Amino acid sequence: MKLGLYLRNMGPQSATDTIVACARAAEEAGIDDLWVADHIAIPPDDAEGSGGRYLDPLATLAFLAGMTGRIALGTGVLVLPYRPPLATAKWIATIQELSAGRLLLGVGVGWMEAEFRAVGTPHPQRSKITDHTLAFLHQCFASDEVEANGQRFLFRPRPARPPIFIGGAAPHALRRCATYGDGWMPMGVDPAALRPSVDELRGQMTKAGKPHPEVVVVTSLALDDGARASDQIQRFAELGATRIVHGWRYPDAFAFARAAHALRRALPG
């Protein structure tokens, strides 16, 4: 079981010194991975908790790649329809190159209609755009020479493709994972509903000729009660989870560091 933490790349906690302190504290505590969210155009009436301040997730991870040396860095999740496919592929390859292969690529279709309006992308087309971008990403990481819009070009650097985790709920996320992904990233999933979905996904992955998927569960653990948190982690592992990402609102880097150590202690065994 891998253990991760959500790093707040939003609100006052996204100040430079705070995110650096948090990332280094997680690495020192032995946490496996850090994850950041993706919002680029929060409307004023939906800015509670962030004030509308969000750091771009890809830029944040590129920055943190230079501030850390071991910990994996993930997008949880990158909303693919917000960005052009080629520019997105270049960002992803660059982070993967500069981090020495530490990128974990969680992706999703998005949901906030106001944000889609601001971006200028049709909300009803988000699934189609997501699939197109995923297919294009696979092409880019499969060959040095790629074609886009009728133009051949060299896609370099071309490091190993990062693992792709598909965010979202069953059944759509499971089908997308079997086609384009290496794992599933459910958020706030009811533990009772996890096992049937994991079994379904494993079946689809087998039919697609792929190995068993990773299952990255984003949840909130009871870290103030070590025994309970350990039981929660064990329960998710029994249901098929391979990674647990703890997300919560923390006030500062000191609280984040305490949670990082508490999470590491809660790992069963």
Image (spheres, helix red, strand yellow):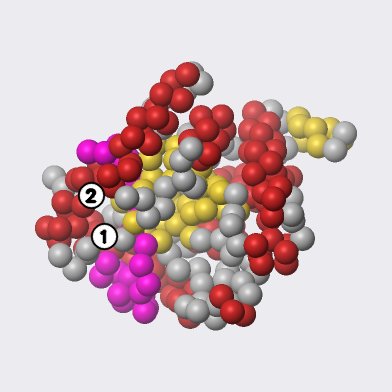
Q: Residue at x 34, y 56 (%)?
A: 219
Q: Is residue 248 magenta?
A: yes
Circle 1 residue? 221
Q: Residue at x 50, y 79 (%)?
A: 48
Q: CA distance from mark 2 to mark 1?
A: 8 Å
- Part of the protein shown in magenta: 238-259
* Quadrant location of the C terminus in the rendered image: top left
* Quadrant location of the N terminus in the rendered image: top left
The secondary element bearing badge 1 is classed as: loop
Q: Residue at x 66, y 67 (%)?
A: 114
- Quarter location, residue 55: bottom right
Taking depth in this image into account, of 263 and 215 the one nearest to the observer is 215
Q: Residue 233's mark?
A: 2
Task: Classify residue 24 as left or right of residue 120.
Answer: left
- Circle 2 Cα neighbour tier, 10 Å, few/some/many (<14 / 14–19 / ≥20): many
Mark 2 and mark 1 residues within 8 Å of each other at the beta carbon:
yes
Taking depth in this image into account, of 175 and 97 the one nearest to the observer is 175
Q: Residue 173's mark?
A: none
Q: Is residue 198 magenta?
A: no
- Quarter location, residue 30: bottom left
> Where does residue 246 sit, x and y in percent of width and height?
33, 59
Eyeballing the image, is 102 above or below 264? Answer: above
> Where does residue 192 sit, x and y in percent of width and height?
27, 44
- Quarter location, residue 8: bottom left
Eyeballing the image, is 30 above or below 156? Answer: below
Q: Residue at x 51, y 21 (%)?
A: 208
